[in-house]
Image (cartoon, rainbow, N blue to C red):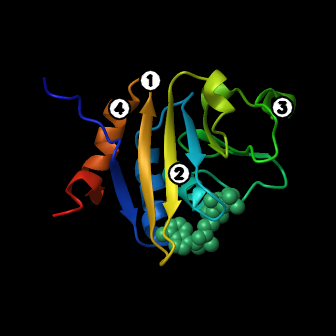
Amino acid sequence: MVAPVSTVGQAIRLSTVDDTRALGERLAGVLRAGDLVVLVGRLGAGKTVFVQGIGAGLGVRGPVVSPTFVIARVHRGGRLQLVHVDAYRLGSLAEVDDLDLDVDLGDSVVAVEWGSGLVEQLSDARLEVQLERSTYSDERTATLVPHGGDWAERVEQIVADATVTDSRSAAH
Ligand SMILES: Nc1ncnc2c1ncn2[C@@H]1O[C@H](COP(=O)(O)OP(=O)(O)OP(=O)(O)O)[C@@H](O)[C@H]1O
Ligand SMILES: [Mg+2]
């Protein structure tokens, strides 16, 4: 039996900030209203940079900056509106509802930093973007993990043109 194609075990190499932004932009091309994107990675991994790329790709207004002190920001004016959430200090996503953002999340793309463990109850379908930082250089690696919906197909589409480092062939 042929195993289904999956990006798990594949990492996309992001040598520079621009590469990380460009990957976010490429993701924006396949985003639809109601999509949830969860960014996972340690401090400084590049989560906000990646969301900047999504914002650029959607063409939204306003600089996408670290929302640490505001928890969430809504960026309008693009192909889709972007809700950028920093869940670092949130105990639950119910608190996002309590923020009274005056947006229908079903009409938006929601990008959540530090949302792992919180967003699972919000939507079965989501894309998890795992960012990892190299100890020795500026390089980051991104692993796109699809959960439900048609994310597996969309990830295939995004990864198709990206520089892919396949950990299974790393020894060659
Ligand atoms: N290849 C790269 N990809 C992304 N960022 C990079 C890269 N190389 C260097 N950087 C730098 O790393 C930093 C990433 O910061 P960013 O705010 O995006 O991280 P973060 O994961 O959102 O952190 P936090 O957990 O504080 O929210 C930026 O200063 C950026 O310029
Ligand atoms: Mg950040």
Quadrant in which the N terminus is drawn: top left
Residue 122 visible: no
Residue 44 visible: yes
Considering every residue shown, the one lying at the far front of the view is: 171
Asked if the residues shown at circle 2 and circle 4 are in contact, with their CB atoms under 8 angstroms apart, the answer is: no
Disc 3 from disc 2: Cα separation: 24 Å
User: For mark 2, what is the residue?
Assistant: 54
Left or right of residue 129, residue 113 in this image: right
Left or right of residue 91, residue 165 in this image: left
Label 4 neighbour load within 10 Å: few <14, some 14-19, many 20+: some
In this view, the residue in front, 66 or 117, is 117
Query: Looking at the image, is mark 2 or mark 1 earlier in the sequence?
Result: 2
Label 2 neighbour load within 10 Å: few <14, some 14-19, many 20+: many
**Which residue shows up at 44% across the image and 23% down it?**
148
Marking on residue 95: 3
Asked if the residues shown at circle 2 and circle 1 are in contact, with their CB atoms under 8 angstroms apart, the answer is: no
User: For mark 1, what is the residue?
Assistant: 148
